[in-house]
Amino acid sequence: MTLVDKVGTLAIHPGALGDVVLFARLMELLPKPVALVAGGEKAAMLEGLGVVDRALSFESLPMHEVFYEEQQGSCTLGRILPACDRIISCLGSDDAGVRSRLVSICRSSECVFLPVRPSSNYPSHLVDLWCETLGIDAPVAWAPWKVPSEWNDAPLRANAILMHPGSGGLSKCWPVDSFIELAVELHKRDHRPVFILGPAEVDRWSEGQ
C-alpha cells in the first residue's frame, strides 16, 4: 500500500480493541483528514465507521524502522506512510530518536507521544488526559457512531444488545456473574443479549463459563 497524499493527522496506536476505541474518540477531535495506524481489523473498522479517513494495518508495516537508525535509502516506511501535519502516537515512549525519525519519515512538523495509561492519582479519564496534553476540549457527551447499514446482520439485529464482559486487565472487569444477571434481565424484557469475547476472555474462561 502506498499513500502519497498529505493528511492532517497521522495517529498510531498498536494496542488492544478497547484502547484503540478510546483513541478513536480522540481522533474525532483532530484536524482532518486522519490516517490511523492500528491493528488491521481495528483500523479497518474505524475507517468503515467514518471515524478516520484512512486505515493502515500496524502488523503489515515495518514499524520497527522508527526504533533504529536506518541506513540512507533503506527505510521503507517513508514510501508507505502519508505525509502529515502532525503525528499523534501511542507507540513507544517519548524518545528523541524515535520522535526525530517519525517526523522525518512523515515529513511532519510535530510529533506528540501520548501516555497509554493515566497515573494512579489522575482524577479523570484517559481521554481527558489526552485532550489536556493536546490542548483541546473534550465534549461533555460523545455521540454514538453510526453503523453502516451493510454491516447489519438481520438475524443479529432483532432486539440484540451486544455485551463485552472482559478486558486485558482483570481488575477493570465487572464480575462475570453480574453480566449474566444483566443478560437474564434483558432477556426477560424481550432483548437478545449477545456476548462478544476477545482473546483475553477466551484464554481466561473455559467454554462452560
Image: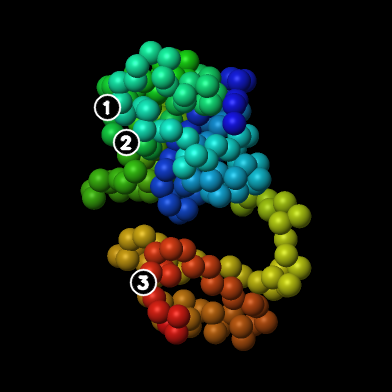
Q: Mark 2 points at which residue?
A: 92
What residue is rendered at 47% in x and 42% in y?
A: 59
What residue is rendered at 67% in x and 82% in y?
A: 190
What residue is rendered at 30% in x and 45% in y?
A: 118
Q: Residue 57 in the image: x percent, y percent?
A: 52, 40
Give the residue type at disc 2: Gly
How many labels, in total?
3
Circle 2 residues within 10 Å: few <14, some 14–19, many ≥20: some
The earlier-in-sequence mark between 2 and 3 is: 2
Q: Mark 3 points at which residue?
A: 204
Q: Residue 95 carries which label?
A: 1
Secondary structure beneath disc 1? loop
Q: Residue 29 in the image: x percent, y percent?
A: 53, 34
Q: Residue 200 carries which label?
A: none
- Closer to the camera in the image, 2 or 94: 2
Q: Where 21 sits versus 62, above or below?
A: below
Q: Residue 44 in the image: x percent, y percent?
A: 60, 45
Residue 108 shows in the view: no
Q: Do the residues labelled 1 and 2 touch (CB within 8 Å)?
A: yes
Secondary structure beneath disc 3? helix
Quarter of the image with the N terminus in it: top right
